[in-house]
Amino acid sequence: MEYKKNKKKNNEVNEPLQEYGKPVTFEEVWLMFKETDKMFKETDEQIKETNERIRENDRSLTERFKETDRRMKELQFLFTSHWGKLVESLVEGDLVKVLNEKGISVERTLQRIKGNHKGKSFEFDIIAVNGAEIVIVEVKTTLRPDDVRDFLDKLSEARTLLSEYKDKTIYGAVAFLTADAGSERMAENKGLFVIRATGNSSSIINAPGFTPRAF
């Protein structure tokens, strides 16, 4: 490449022998601006479409999660219900025998006693009946302290809720497959019979010398 020499204040500057670029016109700048603006708009539309697809996917996932949660709750209810009925059957089958062995003279059992008293609904799982005594049994797959407290509240109202038994001596019992947080000891300390379902039978596991509380 050839160079030409320019002199400025005794300093030599060598510049390439070529023409300077042609200045960009306003029309060309305007065209570039419009093209850039078009690209921005297209990109913005793409972003909006992508966001909408994401929102649709989110809504779809949310609905799927809700449906899965609903089904899980249904399955949990069915599982708990079936286990509860199984435990009730195990307890009810041996209840008369095990109570008689503890000196409580009952001869027959009633299951799922439901009613309504002054607008308040209630339900007792099993009632063992005979003569002057009844034993009301609360059945749980897993017995927890809150279950014991709730059952004691129900027993305190039993004479009112079950008016046909208001003149009888009422005892309480809790029956379960497993017990949590020492709830079986809590129940015994409150004067309740404690019945554990094991295998294909059930048994009273109160300590020797236990005296049930009359409600």
Image: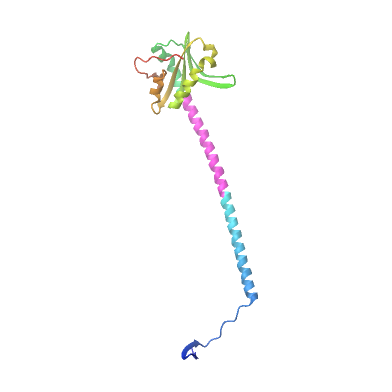
Is residue 201 at all visible to an observer of this figure? no
Q: In the depicted view, which residue is nearer to us: 208 or 99?
A: 208
| Whole-percent x, y for residue 88 in the image | 46, 22
- What residue is at 61 percent from the left and 62 percent from the top? 42
5 shown above or below 155: below
Residue at the limit of the structure toward the right, as seen here: 27
Q: In the depicted view, which residue is nearer to us: 132 or 63?
A: 132
The main secondary structure of the magenta stretch is helix
Residue 28 sits in quarter: bottom right
Horizontally, is 32 left or right of 194 in the view? right
Residue at the limit of the structure toward the left, as seen here: 208
| Whole-percent x, y for residue 135 in the image | 46, 15
Q: Is residue 73 in the magenta section? A: yes
| Whole-percent x, y for residue 198 in the image | 39, 23
The segment highlighted magenta reads: 57-86
| Whole-percent x, y for residue 134 in the image | 47, 13
